[in-house]
Amino acid sequence: MHIGLFFGSFNPVHVGHMVLANYMASFTDLEQVWFVVSPHNPLKEKSSLLNQNQRLHMVNLAIGDTNKLKSSNIEFGLTQPSYTINTLAHLKEKYPKHEFSLIMGEDNLQSFTKWKNYEEILKNHKLYVYPRPNSNSGDLKTHPNVIMTEAPLMEVSSTMIRQAIKDKKNVSFFVPQAVWQYLDEMNFYKK
């Protein structure tokens, strides 16, 4: 099975994530998209993150019973901070019959050469790249393992949603309904 790995903090998961995941599962040759919830992105401040299990729960609420979308906590048991190259090696060992590709925004493709062992990732895995506002994908976009997609341009961000909740603004249409109910019930991001 050909799996697209959509890595992220998902702090919180929002409609932009869901649209992109659905696009990749429906409009490309990927058979499934796995939301890989990252316990801690080495490039992000850890203190702003909700607990990894709460973020995983929100991803599961967002996915519901959609069979082409799955959640993955594979990185929860790996050494922190987690690096994509290590996660890919672990997944290949655990699921030897699956083919794994990465899903990323153009902004990440631009900085991809800063990733640990990026050449090895690019040699062994395809990158499905979605457009990002004001991004230039750089030299890698012509690489044979880079697939530039025409996914909808999504300008929703988790940072904006967290700030809006803190500012007591209504963001109920920016996140899946079940996620909104959970966020509201748990009083997440209000302080």
Image (tube, helix red, strand yellow):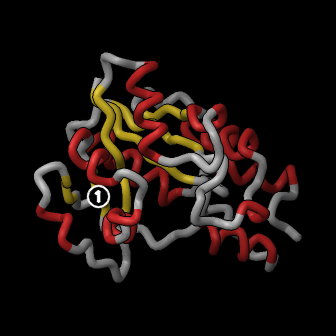
Q: Is residue 9 above or below residue 136?
A: above
Q: Quadrant of residue 175?
A: bottom right
Q: Is residue 108 rendered to the left or right of residue 147?
A: right
Q: As rendered, which of 98 and 182 lies closer to the eye?
A: 98
* The C terminus: image quadrant: bottom right
Q: Residue at x 31, y 61 (%)?
A: 130
Q: As rendered, which of 79 and 100 lies closer to the eye?
A: 79
Q: Residue at x 74, y 39 (%)?
A: 53
Q: Which residue is mark 1?
A: 129
Q: Is residue 149 rendered to the left or right of residue 85?
A: left
Q: Residues within 10 Å of mark 1 (few under 14, many from 20)?
A: many
Q: Is residue 187 above or below residue 71?
A: below
Q: Is residue 39 rendered to the left or right of residue 21?
A: right
Q: Quadrant of residue 143?
A: bottom left
Residue 124: give x, y in percent of width and height.
24, 39
Element at label 1 = strand
- Which residue is farthest bottom? 134
* The N terminus: image quadrant: top left
Q: Residue at x 34, y 32 (%)?
A: 3
Q: Is residue 105 above or below residue 8?
A: below
Residue 65: give x, y in percent of width and height.
53, 28
Amino acid type, label 1 = Val
